[in-house]
Structures are given as structure tokens and as C-alpha cells.
Image (spheres, rainbow, N blue to C red):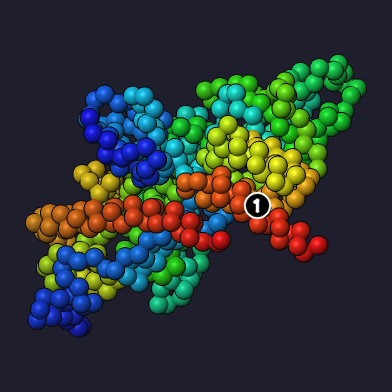
Amino acid sequence: MTEQEEVQWFDEDGKRVDGREKDEMRETKMKADVIEEADGSAMVEVGNTRVIASVFGPQDLHPKHLIESDRAVIKMRYNMAPFSVDDRMRPGPNRRAKEIGLVAKQALTPAMELEQFPKSGIDISMEIVESDGGTRAAGITAASLALADAGIPMKGLVSATAAGVVDDTAVLDVIGKEDKEGNADIPIATINGGNEVTLLQMDGDLTPEQVDECLSLARKGCAELDEMQREALHDSLTQKEGGEQ
Amino acid sequence: MTRLKESKEIATPGEPIYEGQDVRPNSGAYKKEDKIYSKHFGMVQYRKNKVEVRPMNGRYVPKEGDTVIGEVTRVSYSRWTVDLGSAYDGNLNIGDATDEYVDLDEDDLTDYFDVGDAIMVKITSVSESMDVDLSMEDRRCKKLVGGRVVEISPSKVPRVIGKKGTMVKQIIDKTGSNVLVGQNGRVWISGGHENLASQAIKKVEKEAHTEGLTDRIGEWLENQKQELEGEQ
């Protein structure tokens, strides 16, 4: 909420600042298998937010003291490129990146079968190429796609999106402006776009009714993303067939 | 009772593949309530009253009885450590490597295998904590001298070998190369048209999920060979 200048969040038709309906996702593109060297990789574009995720492993784990004798350990990296935001971002890990890496790991772990790879490590990296709100959600969506591409056994795909409140109205898939200047946002991740929620965060003030509204919007969004993830996996096969004769 | 996905169809993680009680999930699938779901992005395969999903990609996981191509990474007092292209290294003890008498204090183990050598070995046992024991006591096991090793996805190995070895036999016949395929996705090629053979193997990997591949690769090899001979 800004004091100095009132933003007009909705126009006469009830459309949002970027011309979307309240329950409409941004235009989303997904592509699996984008990096040759990685065991699995994926790129996800949600509007202007663009994330590339890669997976290496299961492989040797260093440092050795992190090793668990009965399961694989995930090492998660969330990194924003210096050019991903309007003012240059100082490169390197910071408090925020570490926190997002941790919650993203916790969002993906319940879907993965880590017991199949004792004593090993899986490196997941989410590289934010361009940021316009919802980077952690797009990152989780991309990482899950990359894990599937890497052949790691999973209960299901994890998809994530954020819902928020602007001008006391719940909206789906908030952009950077709505996130920063709106009332609140709630990122959420689900397994298979279903009832199992693996990530739920909240930032801002909102009423209990708005929380419910946001949740149902975000879950609908996750279900849509889940469909797109499956499509992207199938497409990664046909690309190969068509290429190089 | 209903097959939601047929054999050879592609499934994604968490996608239902079968509904009913009379089929059991095998590797790569799990059961929840009365549906069977896939764990992998891979190909569905029904076998009798079981269903499995074979992943399209993924690193090699050592399995007892597999013959694999490894690279020696360390020479210890009485054994070698061998990288298998997996998260887990293999151990080859001197007793399992040779029938000759070796005096550990006098003889140099690097005379047999040195760091960097490629060897074809058999996995004799894999413990629960993923300690992998290797042996050279198999007809196919040997040190691989010369040639080159190309890597493919381990899940594509059955395709490279083909039905009863037809694919690899065809590549050997048409390129004149010696080709050995390890279950861990490493393929050793030596002699003949090495480049052509490795290209053919990469091509099989890329098109592994398509039908009529053996014939197509056969044709492709013939064409490439004619081109090569035309140049000379």
C-alpha cells in the first residue's frame, strides 16, 4: 500500500494492471531438457519471470559429513542473475536466496523418493534469468520438471503459483508490481495439482476470507500448471525426434 | 480393471496408469487407493499381472549381475576403486581380478590396471548401503585398450543392444568396429569406422522411443558408408 500515490488496480471492465482477469494466469511457457550437460533441466516462463532449473545427480556428495546413510540429500540453490531485476542485483547468495532455496527444497522433498539413493546427493539449481514476481513459484515448477527429466522417482510433479490481494480483491498469479505494492501475497505449491500442499507462505495483511479465496485461486492455478508440465515433458520427446536428420 | 495407459505409452510422474485391483505395481510405479500411478517420466510396460514404468533418463544404479564399463580412479594396497558413471563407486579386489599369484608387497598393482584405465567388469554384489563389489571372472570382462568410450543414457542400453543383440550386431557388421556395451550406458568402440559407429549409437539413443529403429539405423549406416567411400 502506497500512501503517496493511489494505484488503480482495476479498470472499468475489472481487468488488472496488465489486462488480465482476476483469476487468469500470465502467459506461461515450459520446456524440458534445455541443457545438454545436466541430467535434467527445464525452463519456465511465467509472463516476464523466467527461470532455468537444472538437476545433477544422484551423485557423490561433498562435503562428506552431509551424507545420510539411508537417503539422498538435496542441495538446492536459488540464484538471481544480476540483470534479472531493474536495478542491478549484487551477485552471490544472500539471506533471501538462502531462505527461498530452503523452502523450495521443502516443497519438493515430499514428492521425491530419496530412499532409493542412499549416501548420494542431488544438486538442484534454480537460476532466475528475469524476475517479475513469483520467482520462487516458477522456480519450484521448473525444478520439479527438471527432476522428472532427470529420471528421479517421484510421487508426482510439483507445481507452484502465487495468489495475492490487491485493493481488497483476491487475484491469481501476482506480477512484481502487485506483489510489491499490493496488500498481500500467498505462494503455494501442490503435488499433482491436487490436495497435497507442500509450500504455503504469506506476506502482508489480509482477512481470513481473503486467505480462503487466495488458496482456492492458487490451487486452480497449480492444477493448470500441472497440465502444462506434463505437456512439456511429452514435447521434449518429439523435439528430439524432429531434430537432426 | 481398466488400463489408463497401454504398454509403450509415455507416462509422467503422478499420472494414473491403471485402475483396478488385479495388476500390481512393479518398479517405477506405486499404488494409492485403487489406482496405480507412475513414479517416472518414462514408458509403461505391462508384464503378466504387473506393470512397470521405465524412466526415459536417469543415472545408472548398480545392479548385481550387470556387466559394466568402469574407469579406474584409485589404486589401493590390494584393490582398485572403479568409477561406474553412477553415484556409487565399485571395488575390485585383487583376488577377483586375476588368477595369478600377486605378492602385495613386491608387485605393483598398476601393472594390471592403472588410474584412468577403462575396464569391463561384472558386478558381483551390491549391499544395502550401496557398497559395490566387482569381479573380472567373466568371459566378457577385460581391460579395454585403445578405442574410445561413448556415454549414453543407461535406460537406452536395451535399445542399443536390440532384440537378441540385433542392433549392436548390425553396427559391428556395418562399421567393422568392435563394440562392447556396458549396462551402465558406456559403450566401448574400437577399430573400423569408429566415428560412424559412435554416431550410430548416439542416433539410437536419440530415437530410442521410436518404432522400426533397427531397419532405419541399418539404412542410415549404409548411406553414411557409401558417402565415406565416395570421398576416398
In this rendering, is residue B55 above or below A44? above
Q: Hey, which quadrant is residue A95 in on the image? A: bottom left
Q: Which residue is mark 1?
A: B221
Q: Is residue B37 left or right of residue A126?
A: left
Q: Is residue B192 left or right of residue B214?
A: right
- For disc 1, the chain is B
Residue at position x 73%, y 28% in the image:
B141
Residue B225 in the image: state x and y as whole percent.
71, 55
Residue at position x 40%, y 57% in the image:
A235
Residue A169 in the image: state x and y as whole percent.
12, 67
On-image quarter of the N terminus of chain B:
top left
On-image quarter of the C terminus of chain B:
bottom right
In-front residue for pair B13/B76: B13
The number of numbered badges drawn on the structure is 1
Q: Is residue A201 left or right of residue B217?
A: left
In this rendering, is residue B14 above or below B136? below
* Secondary element at tag 1: helix
View extreme (bottom): residue: A5
Residue type at mark 1: give it: Leu
Residue B229 seen anywhere in this rendered image of the structure = yes
In this rendering, is residue B141 above or below B215? above
In this rendering, is residue B36 above or below A146? above
Q: Hey, which quadrant is residue B154 in on the image? A: top right
Residue at position x 20%, y 66% in the image:
A24
Q: Hey, which quadrant is residue A9 in on the image? A: bottom left
View extreme (right): residue: B106
In-front residue for pair B36/B206: B206
